[in-house]
Amino acid sequence: MFTLSKNELEIMILLWQEGRSLSRTEIIALTPTKSWKSSSIHILLNSLLQKEAIQVAGFIRTGKNYGRTYLAAITQDAYSAMQLVKNVPEHSITRENLPGLFATLIHKEDIGPDVLEELQVLLDRRRKELLG
């Protein structure tokens, strides 16, 4: 489990939104309102690689040289779940209070029938896994 810094999270959000591998140059160009300096990109990418939040997807030619391209190694959903589990005391998520936790989450205003249907599919799939 890991937590991303504000600057690392900006890069991850860009990678999640783009849904494709990006070079260092593309990351800088696609984040005009970034809170970090362009010269910090190497440090940020190395930190994200160390945390295994991103992976090297390949190489691209940039002028006379080649540069690496990066791809998110974790989904936004998986990162959000990781942060929830990490920041909620272990005794707070138990078998007994899990239904209450889900009830609170699904009562958000922007949760509509489409999301509830997706959740139902996931619950049905999990039920089949458990019952064989």
Image: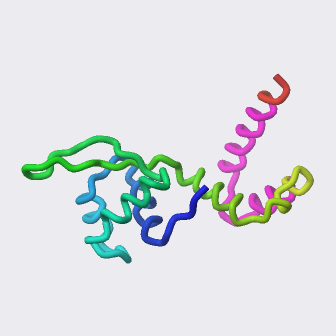
Based on the displayed image, in which of its 4 quarters is residue 92 positioned? bottom right
Q: Is residue 104 magenta?
A: yes
At horizontal 25% and vertical 64% (from top left) the residue drawn is 29
Left or right placement of residue 53 versus residue 56 in this view: right
At horizontal 27% and vertical 71% (from top left) the residue drawn is 38
Based on the displayed image, in which of its 4 quarters is residue 131 positioned? top right
Is residue 90 shown above or below 95?
below
Query: In the rendering, at what x and y percent does residue 73 appear?
Result: 47, 46
Task: Give the main secondary structure, helix, strand or loop, of the magenta stretch.
Answer: helix
Query: In the rendering, at what x and y percent does residue 84 appear?
Result: 69, 61
Query: In the rendering, at what x and y percent does residue 90 appear?
Result: 80, 60
At horizontal 49% and vertical 55% (from top left) the residue drawn is 51
Q: Quadrant of the N terminus?
A: bottom right
Q: Is residue 90 magenta?
A: no
Q: Residue furthest right?
A: 96
Model colouring: rainbow
Left or right placement of residue 17 versus residue 127 in this view: left
Left or right placement of residue 63 versus residue 59 in this view: left
Q: Residue furthest left?
A: 64
Q: Which residues are magenta?
A: 99-127
At horizontal 40% and vertical 46% (from top left) the residue drawn is 55
Q: Nearer the viewer, residue 115 or 90?
A: 90
Q: Nearer the viewer, residue 116 or 83?
A: 83
Number of numbered markers: 0
Q: Quadrant of the C terminus?
A: top right
Based on the displayed image, in which of its 4 quarters is residue 46 positioned? bottom left
Query: In the rendering, at what x and y percent does residue 81 appear?
Result: 65, 55
Is residue 61 shown above or below 1?
above
Q: Nearer the viewer, residue 22 or 52?
A: 52
